[in-house]
Each structure stands twice: as C-alpha cells, then as structure tokens.
Amino acid sequence: MKPLSLYVHIPFCIQKCDYCDFLSFPADDGAHAAYFAALENELSAHSLAFGKDKGDYEVVSIFFGGGTPSAVNETYIERILTLVRTHYALSNDAECSIEVNPGTVSEEKLRVYHHAGINRISIGCQSMQEEELQTLGRIHTKEDVIATFKAARAAGFQNINIDLMSALPDQTFDSYMDSVTQVVALAPEHISAYSLILEEGTPFYEEYSEEVRDEDLSLEMYQETTRYLKEHGYEHYEISNYCLDGYRCRHNVVYWTRGEYLGTGLGAASLICETRFRNTEDFDAYIAANGDPKTIREDVEELDYHARMEEYMFLGLRMIEGIRASDFEKTFGHPIRRIYAKAIDELTKDGLLAVNGDQICLTPTGVNVSNYALARFLFDE
C-alpha cells in the first residue's frame, strides 16, 4: 500500500491576527455545524478512491490545521477521526497532529484529543513577550502558553511543538532570544522558528510595509536560534524546524519530499499522482457542494517533467540534509549535473551549496539566503 498523508483544514478562529493571511475567520456555531457536515461528506466521498476498500493507500499522518482547530468543539475532531478510522486504512503508528492556540483549549479538551487518537500537539505561541503578543494581535498571554503546555503534558502528550516568530516590529535580539530561552526551558520535542513575512492585505502590511527591515538583525536571530537550539539537543532538520532526536514532523516531511497528500476542507491543497489541485476558498460554495470533491476542486495542474524537477530541488533542499544525486537520477532518469550543472557550480562557488559525494545541500550561508539559492533551480530563471 502507498503512504498517504491527510490534511484537514479548519478555517475558524476566535480573532484574526493582524499578520495572518491564512484562510481563516471567526464564525458562529451554525457555521461550524454546516462546515463539519460538508467536511465529513467530503472525507466519505474521497474514501471511494483512497479508502480501505480501495486498498491502494495507507494513511500515515493526519494534520488538523487552520485557522485554529482548537477553536471548535472537540466533538467535531472526534467525529472526523472516527470517520477516518472507519473508511480509511490508518497506520498503527500514524502521526496525528492538531494546531492549538493558548486560550482556546482546556485540560478536558486536550484529554478528549488524546483519547480520540491525536498524538502530536502544535502550540501557536509566537512570542513569550507580552508586548509582542499584543502587537501581533494574539488573544493569549505568556502564562497561557505555559499553562497550555503543562495541560498538554498532563493529558498525556509526549510530542509537542511550539511555534516562535522573529523579525517582529520593535522586536530586539534580546527579547527574541528570551522567548527562545523560555520555550526551550519547557522542553518541547519540536520547535518551529520562522521569520515574519509581511503579506499584502493584512493590517501588518498596511502598517509596516514601508519600514526598512533590519536584515542583519534577522540573520543574527536566525543564526543564534540554530546555535542555541543545537546546544540544547535540537536537530536543525529543515530551514525553520528543529527537533529532539526522533521527533521530526513526519507530516511536513511529506510535503518537502513530495510524498502524496490529500487536503480536505476549505482551500486545502493536494498532491496525488503528480497532480496538484486545491479546494475552493469560497465558504458558501463549499457548503453548497456538500462535500462533492469534483464540485469544490479548483486549479488542477498536472505537473510536467520540468515542474517535478523544480519541486524536487526547491522543496528537497529545504531539508538541511539536502538531496542525493543518486535519488535524483533514479527519479528522473538523468544525472543531476546534466540538468543543473550551472546552478550547482555557481552556488557552490558562492559558498551557498555544498556537494559531498552523493549529497547536495545548502550551506549555513545558503540557508540564510535560501529564497535566492532555491530560485536558481527554476527553469525560467
């Protein structure tokens, strides 16, 4: 059976943060009920092609993302997991993650998650500084983060991620590293540390897009994060992700290594049999379709040979260990240098790429300018 990762999008949140451009919005209980009815129908319909009766796929990871999945009643999450177990072949050791925000979970809700089969919690912390949390428009405090982490431990979770953000408005090196230090003191198994991106259409973009970003400070934060986390036992395994031994996010690794994944829910994206597609982002249209995958499907793209090569390189090189030339040749039938010799040689000369026998990876300097380096593997460059 082929491995399949399942993404479930929950678009609801309590309050949209000022920097957020994700597909998310506050909604009432009636909207929640209508959405989950359509979502369950979508999952049931997909099981005709991907379910246990078909026999081709085994679900190896499930990820409830959003939005804020913890903003809805926990019984909805239970029902989705029951449906997946009923209709899909679920691996015995499947990783099952849910994103939660402090202030939206209780000890009881976390216990329900754990009993339902969730085995990985991702806490949207972003900062441990009260002023920065207020600037971001977060609804929680530092103490809420600590309480949520302790409650997750008490509920039985042994795989917890915490998200952190750098390069925030008025953030200093010391304030950021204080947040990193406080998070490490909690000893989560996984930390995602990423830099703020100002997205058009958000309040943050309107307020801060004219300000000149201190790239040297951003780089210093990134480098010290990597150094400090390594010192405390965290493996830097992807550009923005760190983990203790054995705790890589298996679901996200599927994205970076181009495994097959099925996205369900509003706006969710999928990669199946070298075809990318996504669901409509129109909430009313999604509800009206009542879970019919064909009706809600948009932007279908069958990836050609060159598109697959591009993705293989710019996704695979996000992993700190990089890619293997032998795997590239096995996948595409050509030695990698026949396709990318110029990009490899120039990036290596510039100190952005390292070639060690079969392995090709970004150098620490290359990681710091990854957008530039990865763009060199696009054929239209």
Image (cartoon, rainbow, N blue to C red):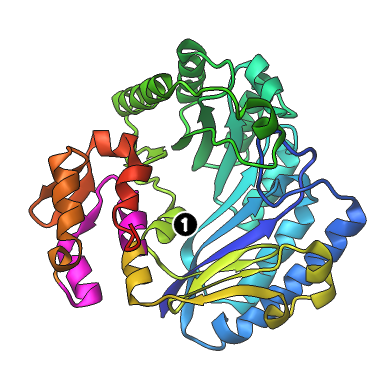
In this rendering, does residue 182 appear at all? Answer: yes
User: Which residue ends up furthest to the top in the rendered image?
Assistant: 174
The residue carrying pointer 1 sits among few (fewer than 14), some (14 to 19) or many (20 or more) residues within 10 Å by Cα, namely many
Taking depth in this image into account, of 44 and 267 the one nearest to the observer is 267
Quadrant of the drawing holding the N terminus: bottom left
Query: On the image, which quarter does residue 219 sit in?
Result: top left
Query: On the image, which quarter does residue 333 sit in?
Result: bottom left
- The picture places residue 179, in percent across and down from the top left corner, at 52, 19
In the image, is residue 86 above or below residue 70? below
Taking depth in this image into account, of 172 and 205 the one nearest to the observer is 205
Decide whether residue 324 is among the magenta residues.
Answer: yes
Quadrant of the drawing holding the C terminus: bottom left
Q: SS class of the residue under badge 1?
A: helix
In the image, taking residue 250 as reference, residue 365 lies left or right, namely left
In the image, is residue 268 above or below residue 374? below
- The picture places residue 373, in percent across and down from the top left corner, at 30, 46
In the image, is residue 57 above or below residue 71? below
Which residue is pictured at 57% across the width and 85% down the height?
49
In the image, taking residue 92 as reference, residue 103 lies left or right, namely right
Residue to which mark 1 is pinned: 251
Which residue is pictured at 60% across the width and 26% down the height?
210
Taking depth in this image into account, of 163 and 233 the one nearest to the observer is 163
Decide whether residue 342 is among the magenta residues.
Answer: no
Disc 1 marks which amino acid?
His
Query: On the image, which quarter does residue 43 sit in?
Result: bottom right
Which residue is pictured at 62% across the width and 55% down the height?
64
Which residue is pictured at 42% across the width and 24% down the height?
215
In the image, taking residue 136 as reference, residue 356 lies left or right, namely left
Residue bounds of the magenta highlight:
311-334
In this rendering, does residue 319 appear at all? Answer: no
